């Protein structure tokens, strides 16, 4: 079976490479794409199995390559310089050949991508040989799939840093307050921390910390990731240190700029963050709707992609609800939405708890009510210390700076202590069911 090949190359590279492709027995060059748009269209039409792409192709970015991969087309990069090779690896391209490669080198790169649709089956491979089938097809059945290039662009292993996502339903339950102060408390414990504002609806981490709106932040990081120029030094430069060991990647200065934060770009940023710091804390938006299903053009940007990407990548998810009747009802309903979106049982925090709206002994009343009527176990309750929180917001400072003895600060510090001691939650990938009578229950597919 021949491999169907697309090329999207610069003119000075195309003729020599096409000549080498003509010398390969099991290759069929189906289309020579003049530009990136033609490459994406040909991939969407299912014309090819492998695309050979030049690093200097005009307009080449991470989103376009993600579209090509989504159509089942594998990518081989063509580099002229070391800079080209570095850029291609930052795009996550595993197989890269030099522009002056030999025919044998090109053949090896293409054969590495031609794999069966199912995992390698040695018994099937030997059976194919015994049946007298094409030896090349038997070899593919005997060969395990090629390794995927590390997505950090540097050819090193993914870092061991943890990712913590702070999420909550609509209604401003205090996600940003928890995220900023939790990140600060983790820093005080000796961890290096990166706080990312990934709320594409109402980013406010910068305002909470007294940072300028002009800070480049997540928009610049996403743009660099899209262009294949985001590496650890660039991410460190875009995420300045506001306290020793405490970095911040501010959010979008305008909600209208949400299309700039694409899922693939944010995923690459989070991969790098694992190598940059010990713990990454993400302030997520509230909406979990997979708006791709509502779009006539499935290639269009998704506004909620940033939130869904962050929650999917997170090792720990903290769900924050407001301690009033409306906020608690929203929290219970939203937990079911969270399970449907990412299949994860979070740590539940009820914030802004006060007796004026929850009655006498508000902490016990809220915990018992949620446990009895919704089977939701509350892990932590943060009291509404309004005076201290107002001073913190007015000064653009953290609670440990303006009110170190605040009850709210003490509870957030307790959360940080437990989070820092907890191992990475490897069970997050396991399916989770939510039942209003029984709460979250993990189940095995074994």
Image (tube, rainbow, N blue to C red):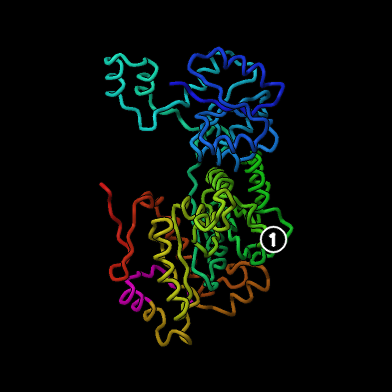
* For residue 208, side relative to residue 27 (left or right): right
* For residue 124, side relative to residue 59 (left or right): left
Residue drawn at 42 percent across, 27 percent down: 115
Element carrying mark 1? loop
Residue drawn at 47 percent across, 76 percent down: 327
Characterize the local packing of mark 1: few (<14), some (14-19) or many (20 or more) Cα atoms within 10 angstroms.
Answer: many
Q: Is 53 or 38 nearer to us in this picture?
A: 38
The N terminus lies in which quarter of the figure? top left
Residue 161 drawn at (x, y percent): 50, 47
The span shown in magenta is 367-383
Residue 186 visible from this viewpoint? yes
Q: Which corner quadrant of the image does residue 184 belong to?
A: bottom right
Q: Is 403 or 301 nearer to us in this picture?
A: 301
In the image, residue 147 lies in the stretch drawn in magenta: no
In the image, residue 375 lies in the stretch drawn in magenta: yes
Residue identifier under label 1: 253
Residue 243 visible from this viewpoint? no
Residue drawn at 59 percent across, 14 percent down: 20
The outermost residue toward the left is 446
Residue 317 drawn at (x, y percent): 45, 59
Residue drawn at 62 percent across, 71 percent down: 402
Q: Which corner quadrant of the image does residue 135 belong to?
A: top left
Q: Is 373 or 7 nearer to us in this picture?
A: 7
* For residue 51, side relative to residue 431 (left or right): right
Residue 191 drawn at (x, y percent): 53, 52
Q: Is 287 or 250 nearer to us in this picture?
A: 287
Residue 407 drawn at (x, y percent): 50, 75
* For residue 89, side relative to residue 25 (left or right): right
Residue 366 sits above or below residue 297 on the image: below
């Amino acid at each position: 079976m021949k491999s169907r090949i697309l090329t999207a190359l610069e003119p000075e590279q195309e003729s020599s490479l096409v000549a080498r492709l003509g010398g390969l027995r099991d290759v069929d060059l189906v289309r020579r794409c003049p530009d990136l748009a033609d490459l994406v269209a040909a991939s969407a039409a299912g014309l090819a199995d492998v695309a050979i792409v030049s690093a200097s192709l005009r307009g080449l970015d991470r989103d376009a390559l993600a579209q090509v991969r989504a159509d089942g087309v594998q990518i081989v990069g063509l580099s002229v310089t070391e800079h080209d090779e570095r850029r291609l690896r930052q795009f996550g391209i595993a197989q890269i050949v030099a522009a002056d490669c030999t025919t044998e080198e090109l053949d090896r790169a293409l054969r590495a991508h031609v794999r069966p649709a199912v995992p390698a089956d040695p018994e099937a491979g030997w059976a194919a040989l015994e049946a007298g089938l094409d030896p090349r097809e038997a070899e593919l059945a005997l060969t395990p799939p090629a390794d995927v290039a590390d997505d950090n662009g540097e050819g090193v292993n993914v870092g061991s840093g943890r990712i913590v996502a702070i999420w909550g339903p609509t209604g401003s339950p205090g996600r940003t307050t928890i995220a900023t102060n939790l990140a600060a408390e983790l820093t005080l414990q000796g961890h290096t921390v990166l706080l990312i504002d990934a709320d594409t609806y109402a980013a406010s981490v910068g305002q909470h910390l007294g940072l300028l709106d002009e800070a480049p932040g997540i928009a610049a990081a996403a743009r660099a990731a899209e262009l294949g120029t985001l590496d650890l030094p660039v991410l460190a430069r875009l995420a300045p240190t506001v306290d020793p060991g405490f970095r911040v990647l501010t959010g979008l200065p305008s909600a209208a700029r949400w299309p700039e934060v694409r899922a693939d770009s944010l995923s690459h940023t989070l991969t790098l963050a694992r190598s940059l710091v010990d713990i990454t804390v993400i302030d997520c938006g509230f909406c979990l709707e997979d708006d791709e299903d509502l779009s006539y053009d499935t290639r269009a940007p998704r506004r909620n992609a940033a939130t869904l990407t962050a929650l999917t990548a997170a090792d720990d998810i903290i769900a924050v609800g407001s301690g009033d009747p409306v906020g608690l009802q929203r929290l219970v309903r939203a937990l079911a939405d969270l399970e449907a979106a990412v299949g994860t049982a979070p740590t539940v925090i009820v914030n802004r708890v006060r007796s004026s709206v929850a009655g006498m002994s508000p902490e016990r009343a809220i915990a018992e009510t949620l446990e009895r009527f919704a089977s939701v176990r509350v892990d932590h309750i943060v009291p509404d210390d309004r005076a201290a929180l107002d001073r913190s917001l007015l000064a653009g400072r953290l609670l440990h700076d303006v009110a170190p003895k605040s009850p709210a600060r003490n509870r957030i510090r307790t959360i940080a202590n437990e989070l820092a001691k907890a191992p990475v939650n490897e069970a997050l990938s396991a399916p989770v069911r939510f039942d209003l009578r029984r709460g979250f229950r993990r189940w095995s597919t074994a």
